[in-house]
Structure formats: structure tokens, C-alpha cells
Image (cartoon, rainbow, N blue to C red):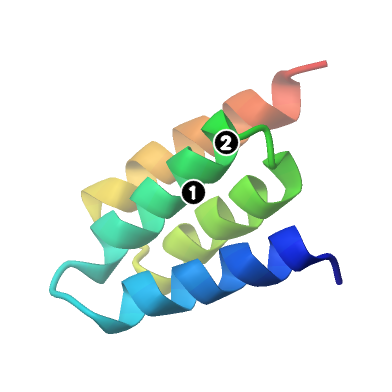
């Protein structure tokens, strides 16, 4: 694993452990990873939102972002 990936994973764990709306935080982390062009990690996080919080509004957003990423060249 690269140092960057390990740092990202640490940040995700830290974010997930310290607050209230975990679905929202996970989605925000996925969006951050997407902006940083870390697309494999962003896709994994979007899939996690969908799997862990399937009835949330964040899951709907994650599904749309994941579909867009899969269609991108």
C-alpha cells in the first residue's frame, strides 16, 4: 500500500468514528476523493454508502455519482 492510500484510509476511519451522520460523512469523503482524482477509492466509498445506508438520501447521491464515474472514459 502506498503512504497516500494509508493516509486516506486513516482519515476515513477518523472521520467515521467521531460524529453523528455517518452516511453524510462517508459521502463527503467519497466526494473529496473524487475531487482528488483518487477514483478507485471514491468508487469504493460510494459503494460503501450504498451498502451501509441503502435508504438514505446519501445513497441516492452515491448511486448517481457512481453511475457517472462508471460512464466516464
Instruction: Name the residue located 30 percent from the left edge and 49 percent from the top edge.
Output: 58
Q: What element carries label 1?
A: helix
> x, y (%) of residue 11?
47, 68
> x, y (%) of residue 45?
55, 58
Q: Can residue 55 be seen in this view?
A: no
Q: Is mark 2 on a helix, strand or loop?
A: helix
| Residue farthest to the top, as pictured | 73
Which picture quadrant has residue 4? Answer: bottom right
Residue 68's place in the image compared with 29, above or below, is above
The image's mark for residue 56 is: none
Number of residues whose C-alpha sits closer than 10 Å to that of mark 1, classed few (under 14), some (14–19) or many (20 or more): many
Q: Do the residues labelled 2 and 1 touch (CB within 8 Å)?
A: yes
The image's mark for residue 34 is: 2
> x, y (%) of residue 16?
34, 75
| Residue farthest to the bottom, as pictured | 17
Quarter placement of the C terminus: top right
The image's mark for residue 30 is: 1
**Left or right: 26 in relation to 10:** left
Quarter placement of the N terminus: bottom right
Q: Is residue 58 visible?
A: yes
**Left or right: 2 in relation to 49:** right
Figure disc tally:
2
User: 16 or 45: which is nearer to us?
Assistant: 16
> x, y (%) of residue 26?
38, 60
Amino acid at each position: 500500500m502506498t503512504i497516500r492510500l494509508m493516509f486516506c484510509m486513516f482519515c476515513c476511519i477518523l472521520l467515521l468514528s467521531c460524529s453523528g451522520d455517518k452516511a453524510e460523512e462517508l459521502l463527503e469523503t467519497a466526494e473529496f476523493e473524487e475531487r482528488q482524482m483518487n477514483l478507485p477509492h471514491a468508487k469504493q466509498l460510494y459503494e460503501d454508502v450504498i451498502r451501509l445506508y441503502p435508504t438514505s438520501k446519501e445513497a441516492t447521491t452515491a448511486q448517481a455519482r457512481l453511475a457517472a464515474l462508471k460512464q466516464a472514459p
